Amino acid sequence: MSAPTLAVFKLASCDGCQLTLLDCEDELLGLASQVEIAHFLEASSAVRPGPYDVALVEGSVTTPADAERVRRIRAESRSLVAIGACATAGGIQALRNFADVEEFRRTVYARPDYIDTLATSTPVSAHVTVDFELRGCPVDRGQLLEVLTAYLAGRKPDIPNHSVCFACKRRGTVCVTVAHGTPCLGPVTHAGCGAICPAYGRGCYGCFGPSGTANLHALIPLLRRDGLDRRAVERLLRTFNAPAFEEELRP
Amino acid sequence: MGAITQATAVLDRQGLAALVAALVAGGRTVVGPTVRDGAVVLAELTSAEDLPFGWGVELDAGRYRLTPREDGAAFAHSAGPQSWKAFLHPQREQLWSARRGPDGVPTFTETQPESRTYAFLGVRPCDLRAIAIQDRVLAGRPPRALDSARAGATPFPDRGYRQRRRGALLIAAECTEPGATCFCVSASGGPAADGGFDLALTEVVDDDGHRFFVRVGSEEGARLLDGVPHRSADLTTESVARGAVDAAREHMGRSLPPLDLRALMGESLAADRWDGIASRCLTCANCTMVCPTCFCTTTEEVTDLTGDHTERWQHWDSCFDLDFSLLHGGPVRASTRSRYRQWLTHKLSTWHDQFGSGGCVGCGRCITWCPAGIDITEEVAALAAERDAAADDQHTAHDDGSAHHDRGPQP
C-alpha cells in the first residue's frame, strides 16, 4: 500500500498555519516518511496532481475565484481539514462582514475596478463539507500533528472542545482575572494554545475562537466590570474570529 | 500516621527554617506556600525563606488580592489558587505505553509513578480533610461512616496517588484567620486540625515574638521535631495559639445553611434556580479544577506518526466539559443547567452515597476562583428558599396538579 498523499492549500490568509507545518521540525521527516507530500507550495514547487487523501486548507473565501477553487479542492480530496482562524471562522479579513466592502474598495484602491472581491469573508465550511476544523491563529503545531497522526491511525483526533481555563488550571497559572482584575476571554475561548497569554500575565484575546460551550452573554458583564467599555469589548471580540464570537451572541 | 499525641512544643523562625532544611536534607520534596504571580501558590520550597512572610490575602467571590501584612506572618492567608491535589493527584500522568513489535504484537509497559517523597508544609485543616476525602476516593482507604454493605476498598485505586500519598509527610498550619469566602465550620469542619497530620503548627506573632505552637500528630512528626531546635510549649504561647484557632470559628466569611443538604439537593432537581445559575455560569471548569476534592480524570491515547508506539495518559477532567458525558449520539448533559446541577448535587449529596461523606470541605476556592463569582453558599440558600416557597404554595393552593412537575434529567 502506498503512503497517503497530503496536500496543503491556501486561500485568503497570511501563511502562518502552513508555516506551522514546516515548524514541526523534529517531526517533519517522520511525517514525510508516512505521507507523500503531493502539494505544498510553501515547501516545494514540485506539485503532483490530485486526488489527495488529506487536504489541509488554510485561509478564508473572499473572492469568487476562491469560492470556485475550494469546491475543486473538495472534489479532489478524500478528507478536508480546515486549519486556522481564517479557514474556520473567516479570520481578520472577516471584519469586512461588519462593514461596507464597496466603501473599502473605493477608498483603498487606485483602480477599484481591478478588485474582484466578495462582500464577506467566510470559512471553508460555508462552501463545502469539512471533515475537521482545527482552530487557532495560527494553529498549534502539536494539535496539527495530532490531527495528522489520528488520520494515519484511522481514529478521531483528540482535540478538546473546552475553554482555555482548563489549560490555565492544568499548568498552574494564577487566574489573571480573579487575581489581577485583567479582562480575559479565556472562559469562552477554545483551548489549544496551552494558555500562553495568561502564563505571561496577559488576558486571553480569543485567537482560537469560541469554545464548545461559550457563554459569552455571561462573560461580557465581567469584561465591563474589569474596566472595558462597550467599544473595548467589541474590539476584543472582533479580532481573529469575529464572526464566530458574533454568532455566539445571537439569541 | 499514628494517633494524635498530646506532645506539644514551640518553634521559633530559626526552628522553622531548620525544619525545612531537615526535610530537604532528608531527600524530601518540600512543597508549601510561596508568592508567585500575585498569589500565594503552592510550589517546591528550597528553604523557609521561600515562605510568604508578610503576605496576606483579601478574598471575595471572583476576586483574590495579595496584601502586605505588617506582622510578617507566613501562614495568614487562605486557600490559594491550587490545592495539594496538584501534587498527590497531578493534572497529567502517564499510565502505560505500548510498542508494536516486528511481528505486529504489542508489548505493554506499565509506567512507574514518579517516585517523589513529599513533605507538605502549611496544609490547612480544610485541606487535610480534603486529602482524607481523596484518600477514600483514590487510595481505597475504608470510608469512615459508610454502611457495612458498601464498606471496603475503592475498586480501582489510583496507583500513583497511593504511592505519593503513602510517602507524604503532612505539616498542618492551623487556621487563625479565615478568609471572606471560607465556610469550613458549616461544612462539618473547623479551623483546628483534627487528625491526619504529622505536625500541626499554629503561628503566633505578638510582643513575645514570631513563633509556632506545635502539636505532634505522629511518630514521624515527633522524630522530625526532635531533630530541630525547639523548646517546650509555654502556657502563654499555647493559650494564645489555641485561643486564636478557637476564635477563628466565629470568623467564617460565609456559611452553608444548617440543613440536610442531601435531602435539599435531592428535592431540588427541578428547581428554577439552576436556570439562574446557568445564565451566569461560564462552564469554564475553574471551580472543579481548584476544588481540593474534585478528582475526575479522563485518559488519552497518544500515538506517534508511525502508529507503532502509543502512550496512555491520565489527565484532569471536569464535569463542566461537554465531552465529559459524551456517549454515542451526543453529550448526556448538554445544558449548563444540567452540568452545574450535576457538580453541586454530587459534591453535597450523592458523594455521601458513593464515598460515605460529603465532598465539600468549605475551603471557599470555588467561590474565590470563579471568574463570575458564583457562590455555592448563596446558591444552596437560594435552592432552600425555592423549596420552602414551593412547599408553602402547596399548603396554601389547592392541588391543581401543576404545582410540581419534575422536569427530570435535563438534556
Image (cartoon, rainbow, N blue to C red):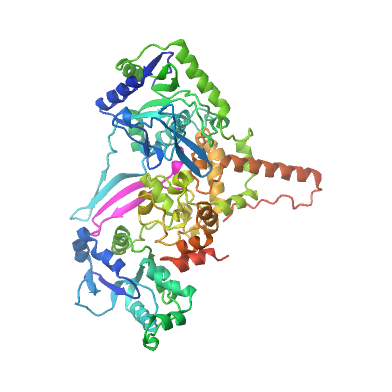
Mark yes or no: residue B142 visible: no
Taking the magenta stretch, the answer to whether it contains residue B276 is no
Q: What's the residue at 38%, 63% (across, down)?
A: A135
Taking the magenta stretch, the answer to whether it contains residue B313 is yes
Residue B190 on image: x %, y %: 53, 27
Q: What's the residue at 41%, 26% (across, down)?
A: B172
In the depicted structure, whether residue B291 falls above or below residue A117: above
Residue A173 on image: x %, y %: 38, 46
Q: What's the residue at 50%, 55% (across, down)?
A: A223
Residue B376 on image: x %, y %: 57, 41
Q: Nearer the viewer, residue B17 or A18?
A: B17
Mark yes or no: residue B370 visible: yes
Residue A43 on image: x %, y %: 21, 71
The quadrant the C terminus of chain B occupies is bottom right
In the depicted structure, whether residue B389 falls above or below residue A135: above
Tell me the magenta residue range. B289-318
- Quarter of image, res A67: bottom left
